Amino acid sequence: MLLQSCRAALLGAVFSFALSPLAAYAETPADTLVVAQSIDDAVSFDPAEGFELTTVQSFNNLYQRLVQSNRDDGTKIEPALAASWEAGSDGKNLTFALADAKFASGNPVRPEDVIFSLTRAVKLNKSPAFILNELGWKADNVDAAVTKVDDKHVKLTWTADVGAGFALSLLTAPIASVVDEQTVSAEAKDNDFGNGWLKTNSAGSGAFTIATYTPHEALVLQANANSSDKPKLENVIISNVPDVGARRLLVEQGDADIARGLAADQIDALKDKSGVKVLSVPSARTDYILLNTKANPTLGNPAFWEAARYLVDYDGIAKNLLRGQSTVHQSFLPVGFPGALTDTPFKLDVEKAKKVLADAGIKTPFKVEFIVFNDQPFLSIAQSLQSTFAQAGITLDIQPGVASDIYARGRSGKFEMTLRYWIPDYFDPHSNASAFAINKDNSTNTAAKYAGWVIPELTDETLAAVKEQDAAKRAALYQDLQKKIQASSPFIFTLQGNDQVVISDKVKNYAQGLNADQVYYDKVEK
């Protein structure tokens, strides 16, 4: 009882710190990493559901998967919960030998946990479920596809025409995280597989656990005493600081150890400041405008899609507004992925956009509802777009909102136009292609579905590309897909990110990779 009381007191003190981001502190606690950023996008910390930047960045710290991407080279796949694996002779199954590991609860990681985790993710059918659907797994067949061999081995089989290498890539995605069946099942209500509880709690074998989470205020992680690789610090506080100026002051004054999502002005002001340093981390994030083709006939008209491509000041946004935080990029595969296009065929050309609209009989002026995250740089980018679209007689009615609400509206089709970014779920070009070029019948949660864009022919081409075993031919197929979507689709790709993270000089061994989920706190020291 005394131990529990002490632990509760510690968490209370940590949480009080988290909820007071603007208070003045001489320095952050020695055993605690304090991160200032916006966490307003967080919808769920269930790895079968969480699909936002904040939640995705947490998963490598809370959970493990059978296999994982190498921290330095994401294309390399390494053991995690699986000590080893063997591919079947038919190329459509993998048998994994489990390493010795424990969940934060103290329960051992068993084949039953792997089975529960993968099958629940498919059956829940939340936003990231389409990743596992790539194996042909559906609610009615996944039980037979993930089976126990013995107490240390689990076997995965699939019907999709893809090889073991691609299957391994899929299994590095956050949705393949393994959760503690016994802990989660005890919290299940109304056959939700524990989803309601996992929205704000964790049940993994990663370096940390969720100590407490208050939406729009703070996420507090605590070291997992049962982790096979115990972290260097006891706590990580990710404090919600919506104002970018406040984030800058916190890290500059030593009240935060790390600040993310600062605007270019804040970064410029900190570059020569003593006590902090600015990390520039290449990112696989691609930014795009998403149009809802079902909202009204104009937004569903390919001529409007074409005109919109000439109403974006790509260079101005990248060079003048973001200043090193993004580069112009106009295709769905980020640079660094096989087959990525690097050409930029579109530029701001208002007269050309006007002609496209007029030739298509689209009359101006008209208004478009434009929902955006109430955070930078999204608001500044939205204002730039508002200015350039207005020159063609199109009024963008900017409606800022909390990111989690904007996500919900986007996924439910309750929008006309919005700003989005896409982050690959695994290191394979199909990760992005499956989002933007697959939607045969609106049955799978993809970006194309959110756009209301049904594309059976492109879907077939995308499914053919993932089956191709020759690397050069496969890259060429993805290039062709990009060109088609680049030319005509309800997606206007604009930028590729470059993350600028400000950290205190006291922080050592912070690691972040090309992909969004590659944020690691386990080796951080102060």
Image (cartoon, helix red, strand yellow):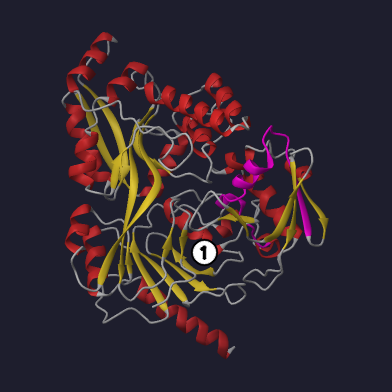
Position of residue 468 in the picture relative to residue 370 (left or right):
right
Position of residue 372 in the picture relative to residue 409 (left or right):
left
Depth check, front residue: 375 or 296: 375
In this picture, which residue range is highlighted in magenta? Answer: 153-180
Q: Is residue 167 above or below residue 443?
A: below
The answer to whether residue 67 is seen in the rendering is yes
Residue at the far right in the pictured view: 150
Residue 516: give x, y in percent of width and height: 44, 52
Name which residue type carries label 1.
Asn
Depth check, front residue: 113 or 16: 113
The question of residue 57 being in magenta is answered with no
Q: Quadrant of residue 24?
A: bottom left
Residue 479: give x, y in percent of width and height: 46, 28
The question of residue 169 being in magenta is answered with yes
Dot 1 corresponds to which residue? 61
The residue lying at 67 percent from left, 73 percent from top is 106
Q: Quadrant of residue 220?
A: bottom left
